[in-house]
Each structure stands twice: as C-alpha cells, then as structure tokens.
Image: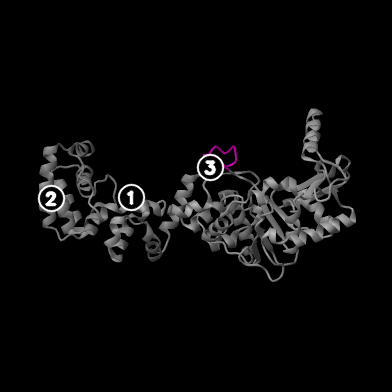
Amino acid sequence: MNQRIRTRFAPSPTGMLHIGSLRTALFSYLWARKNNGEFIVRLEDTDQARIVEGAAEQILSSMGWLGMDWDYGPDKPSPEFGSCIQSERNDDYTRYIQALLDSGVAYYDWTSPEQLESLRAQAQANKQPFVFRKNMATLEGETGKAVIRIAIPDQTVITWTDHVKGLQSWRGKDIGDFVAIKSDGFPTYQFANVVDDHLMEITHVIRADEWLSSTPKHLFLYDAFGWQRPEFAHVPPILGPDGKKKLSKRDGAKDAAVYATEGYLPEAVMNYLALLGWNPGTDQEIFSPDQLVSVFELSRIQKSGAKFDPVRLDWMNGMHIRNMDPSKRLELAESWWPKEAVQSDKAYKQRVLDLVYERLKKFADLAEYSRFFFARAMAVDVQEIEQETKFTPEEQANLLVATIDLLQASDFTETDLEHRLYGYAKENDLKVGKYFMLIRLMITGSRFSPGLFETLNTLGKAEVLERLKT
C-alpha cells in the first residue's frame, strides 16, 4: 500500500468518551503521525434516537486535551470528501446502496420485528445460531417500511490478516444477510462506515476487537464495490483491576474528561494509555508524546486485554510532574493552590512547589500538601503529640521554650538550622526523629512535610516563631 497513511477515529455521540475509546483513538492517532499521515475524526451519528446532547463536544474536547490533533473532523470538513458527520453524508449512502440494489447484491426486506423475533426463537429452539438469509425475507410490502439488506452467498469465504489478531477466515453461511439501510432511511454502522472509509481513503482501520466479527461484512462490501480494502487492527479491551472483565465505572473507570478536572497531565495519561495493550519492546516506561509517535508500531499491540491500574496511572503522572521544567510546573500548578495562597507572590509559590512537587501524584494533591505554607494549621493536641513523640506534656512545654530560644538566635539558613537543632538534640540526648517530629507538628500541624530545615527556611523566621509562640 503506497498511498499516504490515513487513519480515523469514528465515535458515536451516544455518551461521554470512555477511557477505552480514548485509548483506541490514541492508537489510530499515533499510527498516522508515526507515518507522517493524516488522522480523521468522524462522528457516526446515524442512530439518532441514542444521541446524547453535548457528547460530541465532550469527545472532541477530551481528545484535544490529551494532545491529539486531527487533520479533518466535525469542526474541519475536507475540501476533498466533505463533512465528517455521518448524518450530513446521507446522499453518499443513497447513491452507493442504489448501486448494490442494481447489481443484486442488496435487496429490500419487509420482515417485521415480530417475524424476526419468531425466526430467532425458532433457531434457538433448534439449538442453532440465528443467521438471516434471503429465503427468510419478506420481499414485498408497504413502500417506505422496508430495510435494505446485503445478501452474502453461503459459499463466500472472506479472509484477511489482522495486524493484531492474525489470519482470519469467515464463511458466508455463518455471517448471514445484514441490514445496510434501516427503515428510517438512515444507514447502519455496517454500511456507512465502509462507504465513508472508502471515500475518505482510510488506509488503516484501528478499532476495538468487539468489531472483529463485523469485519467480514465490511470486507464483503469492499469486494462487492471493487474497492481496495484497508488494513485492520483490532485492539484488545482494557480490563478491570481483576483482569477478567472489561473495565467499567464500577471498577473505577471514568469518562475521559474527568482526568483533566483531577489534575492529571495529558502527556501522562497519553503515556499510560499507550502502554495499555502495547509495549515498545524495551524497558522504557516514561515517554513524551513525540517519543510515542516515534516508537509506536502496530505489530507490538498485544492480543489479550490489558488491566487498568489507577495506582500505576498515579505513579506515572507523578513521574511526569517530576520530569517537568520548573517554570512549566509552576504555570500548571496555578489553579491548584489552596485558597489561602491567593495573596502569595510567584517567587514564594515557586519555593513551596520546589519542596512539595516530588510528593504529588496529580496536581489536585497540591492544596493538601502545601496548605500549611500559607495558613496556620489548627493546634495539635498535646496528647496526640505525646502519642507521636513520646514526650510528656511537661517535656513538650520545656522543649518548646528551648527551641524558640534556639531559633531566635539562628540566621535561619538551612545550614544553621540543621547545626543548631541537631546540636541541641545531641547535647540533650534526644532522639532526633522524635524531636524533629515535635517541631514539625507544632509548625505544620502534620506528620508529613518536606524536609524540616527547608520548611522552616521557606516559612521564614518571623512566621515560625509566631507559630511556636501561639
């Protein structure tokens, strides 16, 4: 196939974009960009009754947030093939279905839903799979009430080599005659996607493996029209944490748009999704978007499903935060500071962020980890301090007075703070960890904070002494 690589992602706007669908879109995007090709987003909205208001906008927004751009889409019609919205392409489907009617490949069928149900029940009673054939059809009826079916001869054998699933072979007698045009005049997915993929010159169809059984129908249409077949790659599903069933919201799956609102980095989510069901063939785990484009290969998509692990996603997001340029990190952190930080200047925020960013799994954690730098925490109960440090209330009071004296004499550089506090602990035979925990609790109200000396230095002498005295 010497023509330019062109892939597509063709979601239906019947709900918000699931993380699994976003992964499928990503694979299509990476393959196009890897080959300096084109990537198309096409809305398949022929099932008008199931369309959810706002879903189309959310799909495009989520893809854009992740960092995917498209050459043509619902918002970018092509001068070559027109709209990327199926409901606006009905003239094409009418023209091409007429060609199949004229050639005898397609036929009108007036079989009612009740008749279909009866035929299914009969097949079930005979313990046979239900496969519709033309001899079952009602070939005459009221004008405008029929569907149009594609007749697949029993002796037909359809084979292809899938980039993921390998050699596939299907017999016509196991496929049956399928509906191409519904009684409302709209095409089915099975028909419209083939016509669109041909007219849009799609070279590679990368989609979920749930569509594997539909591929023989699509290839039959390509052959019936005399069109060149695209190549196919049917990717495995994303599995829940148990690794047994498809990921669902019950397993912690979220709509793709939610990750942006929780402080995840798009490049981290892209990195994580790319490694769900694909591997680079090396031990490298952290990739930039450009690196993913460079190394992505269809041949390295695995056949089996990949388990979704939110803990690993958090780890990977934290790694991307740590690897980020400090000025870029500060820019992205701006909307995640605690409300108490509103009066603080950029330089102080940079110092605070430099101390806490290594603990962040996502930017939504920033408020929790940094609040004590901007607001005084509620006083910690002496009994709680005793439980943590083993110092009695009386010992706590004595150590507090001594520590205030020490810090008043300090120039508050990290080096001087370390020298004085370590020296005092050694001179008084104190366990350093317990003594430092006492100071940490009194200053921050928390057992966890960045390094004690860095924290004291950043807060400043006046603020630290004020907190200790109160």
Query: Marks 2 and 1, Cα distance to the nearest angstrom?
Result: 24 Å
Residue located farthest toward the top when viewing the structure as drawn? 125
Q: Is residue 292 left or right of residue 342?
A: right
Tag 3 residue:
249
Mark 2 vs 1, N-terminal side: 1
Q: Which residue is mark 1?
A: 368
Secondary element at tag 3: helix
Residue 469: numbered disc: 2
Three-letter code, disc 3: Lys
Residue 128 shows in the view: no
- The location of residue 173, given as percent across then percent down, is 85, 41
Mark 1, Cα crowd under 10 Å, few <14 / some 14-19 / many 20+, is few
Camera-side mark, 1 or 3: 3
Viewer-proximal residue, 312 or 16?
Answer: 16
Residue 460 rendering spot, x and y as whole percentages: 20, 59
Q: Residues within 10 Å of mark 2 (few under 14, many from 20)?
A: few
- Is residue 241 inside the magenta stretch? yes
Asked whether 282 falls inside the magenta stretch, the response is no
Can residue 340 be seen from the camera position used here? yes
In-front residue for pair 93/232: 93
Q: Position of residue 361 (x, y in %)?
A: 41, 51
Circle nearer the N terminus (2, 3): 3
Q: Nearer the viewer, mark 2 or mark 3?
A: 3
**Mark 1 or mark 3: whose residue is earlier in sequence:** 3
Range drawn in magenta: 239-252
Percent position (x, y) of residue 197?
Answer: 73, 59
Q: Is residue 222 above or below residue 346?
A: above
